[in-house]
Image: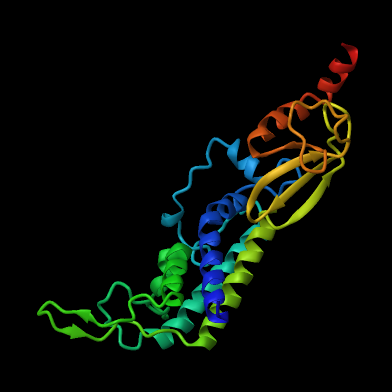
Amino acid sequence: MTSATIARRETVEALRTIRELWGELLLAIETPPADVWPPRQLAHTMRDDDALLVETRAPLVLREHPAPLNLRALDTGRGIEGRLFDLADVLAAQAQQQTPLSDPRRWMYRSDTSPGSRAYGLHWAAVWIEGRVLDEDTTPEPALDGALVEAPFAPVSEALLREAHSVARWCEGRLLAELGLDQRETPVPDRPCPWCAGLLVLHTGPEQGPAVTCATGPACSAPVALDSRGRRVWQWGDLLDLVAALGTGGSVAVAQVAA
């Protein structure tokens, strides 16, 4: 597998991760910064108003924010949008020199009087960049009279592919870190296990849902399975039960001891 093939694959994966998690970041902007617990994903699951039509939301760099509840998340979102929009500009400068102005696939530059394609938001920018990275629409196409016309886009150079790879991975990393979904293990010292008072640890990663383990090990009586290291583990599907148990203030463990 060549380095260019790896760069294309990783760039596409990063762009798709950004699109999939963009709604989570928009919710984070509208939510006060949270402590370690509960995991951001779970907090949003418990919200009643978390339905977002992400594709129809105005870009963060274009809309006004009179009272954002999480300025750090807003800055992260603006940074990601700005980097992807600028990358699209750079790719367009090389790849669409022959693209007709009337072609809806064309990336439109920002001007003093119009935001251009930036008005369509991050989702469109990410999809458009992915198409250039994958060299889509780079072969001659049939016209209405059956004749072939020039391809609307040119393949991107290896240098631009490396640039796209760097920008996409940077944006993905910023987004995962802001949402607490990068690879990390975070102790939750102020919320001991309701069943044994052991230390709970929150595990997150870009390829997994959040999970929580109890450091006590098999001696913990929590009604969940053991992981490969012998710790009680609450996987994604069990976390609502753990939230409910933590809400009892430790009464689960007290009740078991009393029994």
Quadrant that contains the N terminus: bottom right
Toward the left, the furthest residue is 145
Task: Work out whether residue 64 can be spotted.
Answer: no
Reply above or below: 83 against 29: below
Instruction: State the image quarter where residue 227 is shown.
Output: top right
177 with respect to 44 (left or right): right
Reply above or below: 129 against 186: below
Q: Residue at x 82, y 28 (%)?
A: 194
Residue 112, percent from left and from top: 42, 80
Residue 127, percent from left and from top: 43, 67
Q: Nearer the viewer, residue 224 or 72?
A: 224
Reply above or below: 253 against 172: above
Instruction: State the image quarter where residue 83 is shown.
Output: bottom right
Task: Work out whether residue 19 can be spotted.
Answer: yes
Q: Residue at x 52, y 72 (%)?
A: 84
Toward the top, the furthest residue is 259
Q: Residue at x 30, y 81 (%)?
A: 139
Instruction: State the image quarter where residue 99 is shown.
Output: bottom left
Reply above or below: 197 against 205: above
Quadrant that contains the C terminus: top right
